[in-house]
Image: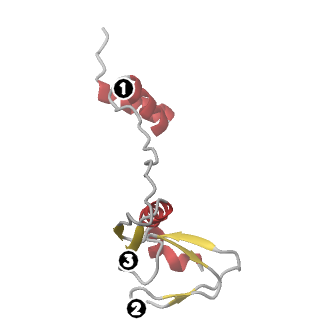
Amino acid sequence: MTEKVTRREMLNLIGAAGGSAAVLGASAALGLMPNSAAASIPQLKPLDATNRKSVAILGGGISGLTAAYELSKAGYDCIVLEASHRPGGRNMTVRSGDIIDEVGNRQVCEFDDEPLVVNDSARRSWQSLK
């Protein structure tokens, strides 16, 4: 006697054997996942000197800075509004001797001279990097 295996059970078995990439591939093959889509760079019409437009961009993270860069190339006047004291959003580069004090917990970078890119999610474990 054979028992029927549900899709969920089958995906769990595939995941146990092949990991998340195998589950993703199997889900796509079964039609359970939407087709992947990639965003294209918008083709902005360049503005001439008589037809200038101004754009306010909220947030100086990687997306906001990229938007400002692309719009500036097309002739838009951009202003980036960032709540933090520095641009970059979640990403920041820390070098030896840098002082970080964002929430009243002053920390000095005391490791080697090579720069370290720190993501916001890793800041809580900052002291373990020293």
- Above or below, 40 against 58 in this view is above
Whichever of labels 1 and 3 marks the residue nearer the N terminus, that label is 1
Residue type at mark 3: give it.
Answer: Glu
Single out the mark in the foreground, 3 or 2.
Answer: 3
Looking at the image, residue 109 sits to the left or right of residue 123; the answer is right
User: Which is nearer the eye, 80 or 107?
Assistant: 80
The quarter in which the N terminus is drawn is top left
Q: Residue at x 65, y 84 (%)?
A: 96
Whichever of labels 3 and 2 marks the residue nearer the N terminus, that label is 3
Q: CA distance from mark 2 to mark 1?
A: 50 Å
Residue 15 position in % (x across, y down): 43, 34
Residue 43 position in % (x across, y down): 45, 48
Residue type at mark 2: give it.
Answer: Gly
Q: Which mark is residue 82?
A: 3
List the residue tagged with mark 1. Answer: 10
Residue 41 position in % (x across, y down): 46, 48
Whichever of labels 2 and 1 marks the residue nearer the N terminus, that label is 1
- Above or below, 102 against 124 in this view is below
Looking at the image, residue 7 sits to the left or right of residue 90; the answer is left
